[in-house]
Image (cartoon, rainbow, N blue to C red):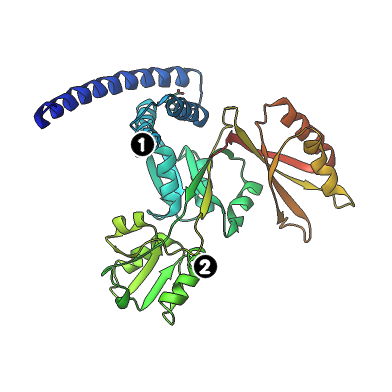
Amino acid sequence: MKTLQELRRDIDAIDDQILDLLNSRSRLAIEVGKVKAGENRDFHVPSREREIYERLAAGNSGPFPNEAVRSVFREIISASLALESPMKVAFLGPKATFTHLASLQHFGLSAELVPQKSIPAVFEEVSKGRSLYGVVPVENSTEGMVSHTLDMFMESDLKINAEILLEVSHDLLSRTGRLEDVKKVYSHPQAIAQCRNWLDENLSGVPVVDVASTALAAQIVGEDYTAAAIASEFAAALYDLKVVRHRIEDQVNNFTRFLVVGRKMADRCGDDKTSLMFSVKDEPGILHRMLEPFAKRGVNLSKIESRPLKKKAWEYIFFLDLAGHISDPVVSDAVQELKNYCQFVKILGSYPRAK
Ligand SMILES: O=C(O)C(=O)C[C@]1(C(=O)O)C=C[C@@H](O)C=C1
């Protein structure tokens, strides 16, 4: 058996090789960046990234775990992208929101992530070209749709470039880390709703205060030794708080879906999703007819959602998610047929389906 010293020497030699290879890869990424700049293409290509992760996971013989392969390559690609072109990404802040976490999961540590005060502010940052992409929440598996985000697509022409799925887990955080010191709890109303049973059982009678985000709650609690925040563990690290209790949410498997918006349409990856919105004339049987173009072509619809059309009472806009890319003939034919029944149809984007 080798000695510890010998084993460490072997590891050093391998680390040197990894570093050499990382630099060779980076030089190639810089070349790719030049080609893309010449052809006016997007630097960030979610479909290509997905292909890389899947190819590596399929060929990985271990023992290095696939989850770690993904994290390592997330950062390699993030750094490569920054070498191609430094990139700003706007997200619904403040720092340490779940949208911040989702942005880090998708873009890695080398992107410049810029917190925004509201969902409209994220859209404006991207529309005006100050950030290349924006990240906003769109749906929670227990609380439902984030209607603010859907409403933004009525006014904005930004396209959905990717979706991010994040498991949302809430911790109780405070300065002291002791449950008996907690005389007040702060959090976002959705987070409070998701931890209602736990609060009733463990902090009954303690006032619970709504604030604009879980991150803001953590920020407030940073200055008050008698308060606690329901927020992520990530917020604890950022605002110097201790975890009083881990995972206090009532439902396990609580996922939030986020959208990455940009100014251009994303490329096809072969396992895509398309989101569109449309409004229909108010007449009998119209809902049935508008779904028929998809049903008869076997296009799978994963979601339909309606929102009131603000300009007119009792008229609605529909949001539809379906399997496939808008460049797939069955999808584009179905959408073409849908247009016959609609006052307007807007494609919000085709993008790789998150797993
Ligand atoms: O292949 C590309 O298009 C690249 O820009 C290279 C690369 C990578 O590092 O592999 C970097 C960023 C893209 O989002 C996808 C892949």
Q: Quadrant of residue 159?
A: top right
Residue 49 seen in this snapshot:
yes
Residue at (74%, 28%) from the top-left corner? Answer: 330
Up-down: is 336 above or below 31?
below
What mark, if any, has residue 193 been given in the picture?
2
Measured in 3D between alpha carbons, the distance from the residue under mark 1 to the one under mark 2, in whole angstroms, is 33 Å
Q: Report the side of 154 relative to 72 (left or right).
A: right
Numbered badge on residue 217: none
Seen from the viewer's position, the closer of residues 153 and 287 is 287
Tell me: residue 208, above or below residue 330.
below
**Quarter of the picture for ligand 1?**
top left
* Disc 2 Cβ-to-ligand 1 distance below 8 Å: no
- Give the left or right position of residue 218, taking residue 240 as reference: right
Image x and y of residue 245, in percent: 35, 65
Residue 161 rendering spot, x and y as whole percentages: 55, 36
Measuring from the top left, give residue 127's x and y in whole percent: 54, 41
Residue 68: assigned label? 1
The N terminus: image quadrant = top left
- Residue 78 x/y as whole percent: 38, 33
Mark closer to the observer (1, 2): 1
Neighbours of disc 1 within 10 Å: few (<14), some (14-19), many (20+)? few
